Each structure stands twice: as C-alpha cells, then as structure tokens.
Image: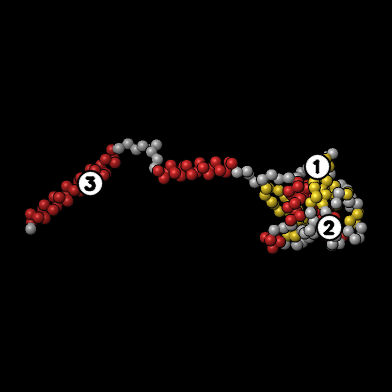
Amino acid sequence: MGVFIRTLIVCLIICAGYYLYTFLGKESYQELDTNKTTISQEKNYTEEKNRQKEENLKPQMQKMQICFMSDENTIHYVERETQTPSLEIAIEELLKGPTKYESAHGVYSEIPVDVKLMWVKDENGKIIVNLTRNFEYGGGTKSIQNRIKQIKLTVDSFNTKKPVYLYLDGKQVEYMGGEGIYIEQPLN
C-alpha cells in the first residue's frame, strides 16, 4: 500500500506542476494586448453607435410656455414639447386646456373648451389671433380678463415684442361678453 500512496503523491505533484506551468506560467510571460476586444464589447460598441445615430436622426423636441391659471387665481406657466414650436401650436395647446395631471395640481383655463383657433397671422409688425366667437361667452368680467391674459402671455412667451390683437370670427374685438367689457387693443 505504501508504493501506491507514493505513486499517487508523485502523480499529483506532476499534475499540479503541469497545471501551474500550462495555465499560470504562460499567462505571466505573455504580453497583454490592450487592443483586443471581446465579441460582447464589439456588440456593445455597435449598439451604442446605432443608438447615437438614431438620436441624431430624431428631431429634437423643443419646449414652449403655455399660460394657464392656478387655484389661487394667478398665472401658471406649463411647458409643452413639440418638434417645431410655433405661435399657432402654442395657441392650440392653450385651447386644449391643461392635462389631467396639471388639473389635479390646481391648474385650469378660463377659456371655454369649445373655442377653436381660426388662424394666427404675423403681418405688418403685429400678431393677430383669430378665435371663434364663443371665446367671449360664459363667465364674468374677471373670467374674460383672465382669458385675454392667457392669450397675451402665451403669445408673449415667444418674445415677439410685437403688438397682439384679438379677433373673433375674423373681426377685431372692441367689446366682449354680456356686460360689454371694453377690450383695449393691442392686448400687450
């Protein structure tokens, strides 16, 4: 039995030496090639490049400021994102009213929900916003003043510094509402 154990120990020593020489010895003498990449590294690099290409091809979203009211009856600006901000898009967003999230946080609009934008013109150094006639119906003096303020401040958020005129059904407004509130033009 003694010969068997000695032979087993010699075999284990030889195997251990071979293992150390083959796997550990060669690694310590090889130069490291830092330019080698693994397949997974190449895949990640390719995926990152493709993602960057897609982002560059996508039109960048830009923000616009839309003026609403808050529970405290004060002005409250919200941001809307669009690919090509324009005054027309801003007025349309204003007429859509606040989102459910904004409403849940006390933001509202004095503008009636059925008001539509007929057109917006930037001509002869002035901006004309033409809305449907139902813009003037409902609410009292304060409500009408806040509606006009929402229009004026939404237009002003574009930094046009041009006078803003309000038209209803194609005609410049002088008086609005059942109380006949005088509307000074330009609004700003």
Disc 2 residue type (three-letter):
Asn
Q: Could you classify mark 3 by the number of other residues whose Cα lies within 10 Å: few (under 14), some (14-19), or many (20 or more)?
A: few
Q: Position of residue 174 (x, y in %)?
A: 91, 51
Front residue of this view, candidates 164 and 114: 114
C-alpha separation, residue under disc 2 versus residue under disc 3:
90 Å
**Mark in front: 2 vs 1:** 2
Front residue of this view, candidates 51 and 75: 51
Disc 1 residue type (three-letter):
Asp
Q: Which residue is mark 1?
A: 122
Disc 3 residue type (three-letter):
Tyr
C-alpha separation, residue under disc 2 versus residue under disc 1:
23 Å
Relative vertical location of residue 54 with respect to residue 151 in this rendering, above or below: above
What's the residue at 20%, 45% (across, down)? Answer: 18
In the rendering, which numbered label is found on residue 98? none
Give the SS element for disc 1. strand
**Which of the two discs, 2 and 3, labels the residue nearer the N terminus?**
3
What's the residue at 85%, 47% (across, down)? Answer: 165
Query: Would you say 173 lies left or right of 150 here?
Result: right
What's the residue at 80%, 46% (across, down)? Answer: 120
Give the SS element for disc 3. helix
Q: Position of residue 54 (x, y in %)?
A: 56, 43
Q: Which residue is mark 3?
A: 19
Q: Quadrant of residue 96?
A: bottom right
Relative vertical location of residue 45 with respect to residue 137 in this rendering, above or below: above
Contact? badges 2 and 3 (CB < 8 Å): no
What's the residue at 17%, 51% (across, down)? Answer: 12
Contact? badges 2 and 1 (CB < 8 Å): no
Q: Which residue is mark 2?
A: 134
